[in-house]
Image (cartoon, coloured by chain):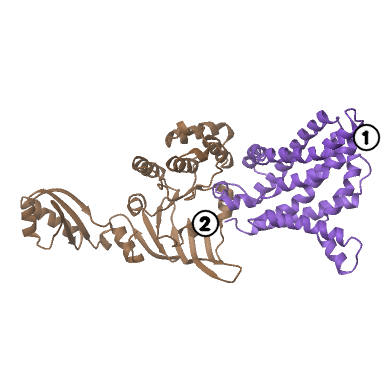
Chain colours: A brown, B purple
Amino acid sequence: MIELNNATKIYRSIFGRSVKAVEDFSLQVAEGEVLGIAGPNGAGKSTLLSLLLGYLRPTSGKVLIRGLEPRAFVQKNGIGYLSELMTINPNWKAQDALTRFATLAAVAPADIPTRVNAVIDELGIGEHRDKKIKALSKGNLQRLGVAQALLRDEQVMILDEPTHGLDPVWTQRFRGIVEGLRRPGRTIIIASHNLDELQRLADRVAIIDRGRLQRLVQTGYDQATDAGGTYRISVAAGAPHLKVMFPQAIESGEGEFELAFSSIADLNSALARLIGGGVLVAGVVPSRSVLEQQFREAVGEPT
Amino acid sequence: MAANLTRYSYWQFRDFIRERGVALIITSLLLGFTVVAPMRAMMGPNIDQANATRILIMALPQIVFISAFIALNGIISTDRKLGYYRFLFSKPVSIPAYYSQYFVVSLAAFLAVFALLLGVFAIVVRPVNPVGALAFCTLVYLSLGGIAFLISSLFRYDWPILAAVFLGSAMINSLWAERDGWRMVIRNMLPPLHKLTPAMTDIMNLGTVDVKAVIWLLGYSALCFAAGLFVLWRRPIG
């Protein structure tokens, strides 16, 4: 549904200097899919999103949404978009801003108050509805940004750093909201620095760096590509047994050990041995998620 | 024009009045005061219709020129500069249509402000027929508007360029008014804003207007406006 074919965007200054922000980028995103985009600062994420919104045109290559050039698609259908930069006129009131965006989004006039109230309630910004944008805290402004993206039932949603500035409670709620947005026919693209968030929300994550697609990672468990990983195992009792059974285990805290496994099956058989040997296992978490591991390999540095 | 965009004109009108209307009123009152106050002091409290029109003709050109400049600068570039386009144009909206509508809505708001100012003039000096004055305001807005629209579609910091174009063409037209040859060619290529002031007296008195001058003014501006639309259509906003 969304197709990037060798898309390249080069910025040229009037002095002849040029910077390749996106280079030879090819990717297809299916209907119903949630795609994550991760990359270090300056990797080309914002340029990529601007290409998808038609705010920029590729220097070469093609970007198509349902067979249309992005600007033509947006002009016809609109996109539920949350910008990383919350650039809304600071003198507008929160509720007025949503009413304006609902008007532009072609929500039927009679439905605008209902829709606006619904997103205000969903994002919990009722007490701020009469405040000016400039009076909103970063978190509330972010919630307003999410609210305006939800005003209409869009086929495509692009969310750039959606939980930036949200407190943990709202970060959690936001994840629930995005889960609720999943439906056949709708494509959601989420750009984030938060790999844990992408791991939870996205079906695939495109890791980009220096403008290029470095890796496309499937976030769910895939037996074919299972390469295991390092896990942190917390034990409530029987730590000495664990040390005997796995002398290579690194003690990372009181009752906490880090162990590397070659596959998920390997991890499971190790856990069975531990439990059978009288060790009381309190928790097992990956030291690094598959995505984080892939990200480090692709980009070469932690986020 | 799409229905959603047409409905949005209410908000555009409101934005103009709040963000530029107040500035227009204050600037116009200050400028108007410097012309009207000495004339009123000189003529006394009982000013007749002819003298009231004369005062208005003296005060109006500079007020309308500066007001049109305030009204038109940044008409497109402000949204680009401040990034407002990001949220606005993720909605199903044509960018050229959005700014075309804003141009028209701004004209309506501009005239509303001048109708108010003419009301103040009526109280302070004497009521005059507002048709001529408003027609002149419309002509100035439309004559400068297309040029401002094009410059704003091309440059993020458009107002210094706009000021340079307006002042530059006024200066060259006055310096080279009688010259011919290449100077005349350049003069004819510049915005024909020098034709506005002679047109004003005719319009204000509801007399015969130099149609050729008006067509030249509006045609030049319309061409620039069309070029601005082409820029918005072809050149990405980001």
Residue B51 location, quadrant: top right
Amino acid found under the numbered disc labelled 2: Ser
Is residue A193 shown to the viewer in this render?
yes
Q: Quadrant of the C terminus of chain A?
A: bottom left
Residue B192 lies, in percent from the top left, at: 83, 56
How many numbered marks, from 0 up? 2
Residue A95 shows which numbered tag? none
Neighbours of disc 2 within 10 Å: few (<14), some (14-19), many (20+) = many
Q: Which of A143/B236 is in front?
A: A143
Amino acid found under the numbered disc labelled 1: Ala
Residue A282 lies, in percent from the top left, at: 15, 47
Q: Residue furthest bottom?
A: A16
Q: Which of A196/B151 is in front?
A: B151
Residue B49 lies, in percent from the top left, at: 92, 32
Q: In this view, does A48 lie to the left or right of B55?
A: left
Judge depth for marks 1 and 2 and give the one in front. 1
Tell me if residue A271 comes above or below residue A115 in the rendering. Answer: below
Q: Residue at x 33, y 50 (%)?
A: A200
Mark 1 and mark 2, same subunit? no
User: Which residue position holds label 2?
Assistant: A50
Secondary structure of the residue carrying numbered label 1 = helix
Residues marked 1 and 2 touching at CB (< 8 Å): no
Q: Which residue is drawn at 53% across and 54% down?
A: A53
Q: How far apart are marks 1 and 2 (CA)?
A: 59 Å
Q: Which of A68/A257 is in front?
A: A257
Tag 1 subunit: B
Residue B50 shows which numbered tag? 1
Secondary structure of the residue carrying numbered label 2 = helix
Tag 2 subunit: A
Residue A211 lies, in percent from the top left, at: 45, 65
Is residue B225 shown to the viewer in this render?
no
Residue B129 location, quadrant: top right
